[in-house]
Image (cartoon, rainbow, N blue to C red):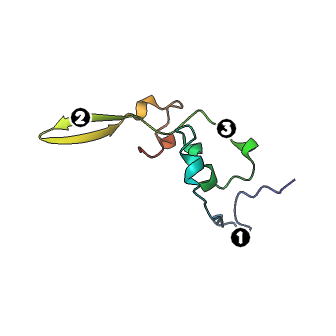
Amino acid sequence: MEERVWRCSCGGLLDLEFEADFPLEKIRLRKPTMWRYREAIPISHDSNIISFLEGYTPLLEVDLEDRTVLFKEDHLLPTGSFKDGGPPF
């Protein structure tokens, strides 16, 4: 079993060394959640993934004074948290 490390042995911040991979052909086929970008998140085993299908907040298009503004509808996130919103594209 791998040792779990939560902070640097010096007591400071933990610095992760990780090189992300973005296999576009896989990403395009996945559900629109933050786990769509699985290879960019440093988790060693997929069995450690827990998801509420977070991410991909709907955008609401509103016209304001001759401009269109996009508002993220974060109140629709499945966890109720504003922190789990993924990119809006």
Q: Secondary structure at mark 3?
A: loop
Q: Which residue is mark 3?
A: 50
Please say whether residue 37 is visible from this viewpoint: no
**Mark closer to the observer (3, 1):** 3
Q: Which residue is mark 2?
A: 62
Residue at 21 percent of width and 41 percent of height: 68
Q: Along the line of sight, which residue is nearer the eye, 23 or 61? A: 23
Residue 82 vs 39, above or below: the answer is above
Q: Secondary structure at mark 2?
A: strand
Q: CA distance from mark 3 to mark 2?
A: 34 Å
Q: Along the line of sight, which residue is nearer the eye, 64 or 27? A: 27
Q: Secondary structure at mark 1?
A: loop
**Residue flagged by tag 3: what amino acid is it?**
Ile
Q: Which residue is mark 1?
A: 10
Mark 3 surroundings within 10 Å by alpha-carbon count, few (fewer than 14), some (14 through 19), many (20 or more): few
Position in image of residue 43 (x %, y %) = 69, 52
Q: Which picture quadrant has residue 74? A: top left
Position in image of residue 57 (x %, y %) = 43, 37
Q: Which picture quadrant has residue 14? A: bottom right
**Residue flagged by tag 1: what amino acid is it?**
Cys
Residue at the outermost left position: 65
Residue at 24 percent of width and 41 percent of height: 69
**Mark closer to the observer (2, 1):** 2
Q: Which corner quadrant holds the C terminus?
A: top left
Q: Along the line of sight, which residue is nearer the eye, 22 or 84? A: 22
Residue 21 vs 69, above or below: the answer is below
Q: Which picture quadrant has residue 70? A: top left
Residue at the outermost front position: 25
N-terminal of the pair, mark 3 or mark 2, is: 3
**Residue flagged by tag 2: what amino acid is it?**
Val
Left or right: residue 64 compared with residue 39:
left
